[in-house]
């Protein structure tokens, strides 16, 4: 595989005037920025519609697309909106933060106005409706709005999915259901044009497929008895999480329902193969989140308030991915990586991930060290769950800092990378040089790390619900010529013939 360099940047973090990043002009400008610097990968976070907490990793549908990302200016160009109908609205006070409460209050009403002017006789639209791919999501969202956003367990007669009851509801509320299908139609229309443009500029898009879904999701409402581990009442009997780790002394209690892998196996993992295929249709590459959960998964009995009393259970492993070995898939193999996990990844042939924030601990066997990183890997400074690189460096003191600097210098010497460690800023730059000069086939950095941002730029703090999670945004002024030149120099390290041996 050609050595590639990339930037991690959620669509939500793009600049723009209407509350959240979208698929409009700023997305195209970002593609131009990447192409100008020589970056060939734009990694995004999941594009799924979010649920409570606004996390894209706890989505209310496995295949639907987030209506917040539909660009309003592009709808205006279609003749579906007048600019004053959305430009005059107050989308939030802070241009660096997404105000999700404002979006929930305003965005859908603007989109409904666009739908009221949409040509519902167009052949492409009628074909889309006949295909029916997003109908379950549309029915789910129609009912959710009818019950003022309440979870489906509080939907009265509709709480337990019944085909006859739901069909009667659909017959009486067809316009509302078609509106939610319209959001998917417009998203896809805008997304495909953006992806085609990116491809023409030499930029591939890496998407992200979460392993789990929200408890309040389409799948839990309609398909839970064929997908998840349930108790006799049809509620989740266990929930997903991870044991105590570097992020939390009590572990992480995610709350997502856990899959009934025996049922999935009996059905030949058809649901998963369809889900992966759909993701590969959207993106050039797909990063599958929490890949170790397919090999062994941690679950906690329902009702517990932290994850310490959970247990590990065996998952399907590489068997689920048979026939998919040649696809553009990246396995997020972070966490407690056992020999069984390593064997499953080796069997699929997928590149795993290495994180430089975890590399410089004095352990010569640390697999995150560039000198221990295989070529078939994607190496990062950090992920969406880490502190920014500059913040992490600033937090290191005493023996930990001494050990980190010693390790960093050693790794640089092995790579032929210039090491400068006098200040936190210089250490950050040195680690970035080490990242892009590594032997890994792909090197990707969050844009916050390239910009040496502090705590304000963190994307997410695991095991917390906060307005600061998933909300950071860049402004157009951040994309300076100086930043482009600096990133281009870093990307140039990918093209050097001398690669770490």
Image: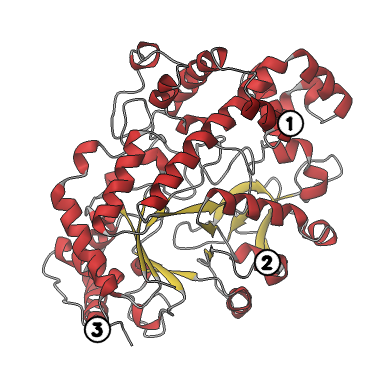
Q: Secondary structure at mark 1?
A: helix
Residue assigned mark 2: 321
Question: Residue 444: which quarter of the image?
Answer: bottom left
Q: Secondary structure at mark 2?
A: helix
Q: Secondary structure at mark 3?
A: helix
Residue at image point 37% right, 71% down = 3
- Specify which label sits upstream in the sequence, 1 or 3: 1
Q: Where is residue 413 drawn, in percent x and y?
A: 22, 84
Using residue 216 as the reference point, say whether residue 280 is left or right of it: left
Residue at image point 60% right, 55% down = 241
- Specify which label sits upstream in the sequence, 3 or 2: 2
Residue assigned mark 3: 410
View extreme (front): residue: 123
Residue at image point 83% right, 45% down = 225
Q: Where is residue 242 drawn, in percent x and y?
A: 58, 59
* Marks 1, 2: nearer the viewer: 1
* Marks 3, 2: nearer the viewer: 2
Using residue 384 as the reference point, say whether residue 349 is left or right of it: right
CA distance separating discs 1 and 2: 30 Å
Residue assigned mark 1: 130
Using residue 133 as the reference point, say whether residue 97 is left or right of it: left
């Amino acid at each position: 595989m050609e050595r590639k360099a990339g930037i991690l940047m959620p669509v939500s973090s793009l600049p723009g005037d209407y509350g959240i990043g979208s698929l409009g002009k700023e997305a195209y400008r970002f593609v131009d920025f990447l192409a100008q610097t020589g970056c060939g990968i734009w990694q995004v976070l999941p594009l799924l519609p979010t649920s409570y907490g606004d996390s894209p990793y706890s989505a209310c549908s496995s295949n639907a697309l987030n209506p917040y990302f539909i660009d309003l200016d592009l709808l205006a160009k279609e003749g579906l909106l007048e600019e004053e109908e959305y430009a005059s609205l107050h989308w939030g006070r802070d241009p660096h933060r997404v105000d999700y409460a404002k979006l929930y209050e305003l965005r859908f009403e603007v989109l409904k106005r666009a739908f009221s002017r949409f040509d519902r006789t167009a052949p492409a639209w009628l074909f889309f409706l006949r295909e029916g791919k997003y109908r379950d999501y549309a029915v789910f969202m129609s009912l959710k709005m009818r019950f003022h956003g309440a979870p489906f367990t509080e939907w009265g007669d509709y709480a337990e999915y019944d085909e006859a009851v739901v069909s009667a509801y659909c017959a009486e509320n067809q316009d509302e259901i078609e509106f939610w299908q319209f959001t998917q139609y417009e998203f896809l229309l805008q997304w495909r044009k953006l992806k085609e443009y990116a491809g023409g500029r030499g930029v591939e898009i890496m998407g992200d497929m979460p392993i789990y879904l929200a408890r309040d999701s389409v799948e839990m409402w309609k398909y839970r008895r064929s997908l998840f581990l349930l108790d006799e009442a049809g509620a989740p009997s266990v929930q997903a999480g991870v044991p105590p780790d570097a992020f939390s002394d009590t572990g992480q209690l995610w709350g997502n329902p856990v899959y009934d892998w025996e049922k999935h196996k009996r059905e030949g993992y058809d649901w998963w193969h369809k889900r992966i295929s759909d993701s590969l249709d959207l993106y050039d590459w797909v990063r599958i989140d929490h890949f170790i959960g397919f090999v062994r998964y941690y679950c906690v009995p329902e009702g517990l308030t932290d994850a310490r009393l959970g247990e590990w259970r065996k998952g399907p492993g590489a068997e689920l991915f048979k026939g998919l070995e040649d696809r553009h898939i990246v396995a997020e193999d972070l966490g407690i990586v056992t020999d069984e996990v390593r064997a499953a990844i080796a069997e699929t042939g997928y590149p795993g991930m290495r994180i430089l924030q975890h590399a410089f601990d004095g352990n010569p066997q640390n697999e995150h060290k560039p000198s221990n990183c295989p070529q078939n890997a994607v190496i990062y400074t950090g992920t969406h769950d880490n502190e920014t690189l500059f913040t992490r460096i600033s937090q290191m003191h005493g023996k930990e800092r001494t050990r980190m600097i010693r390790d960093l210098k050693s790794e640089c010497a092995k790579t032929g990378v210039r090491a400068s460690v006098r200040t936190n800023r210089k250490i950050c730059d040195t680690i970035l040089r080490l990242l892009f000069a590594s032997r890994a086939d792909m090197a990707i950095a969050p844009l916050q790390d390239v910009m040496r941002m502090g705590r304000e730029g963190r994307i997410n703090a695991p095991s917390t619900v906060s307005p600061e999670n998933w909300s950071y945004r860049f402004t157009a002024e951040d994309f300076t010529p100086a930043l482009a030149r600096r990133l281009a120099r870093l990307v140039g390290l990918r093209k050097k013939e001398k690669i770490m041996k």
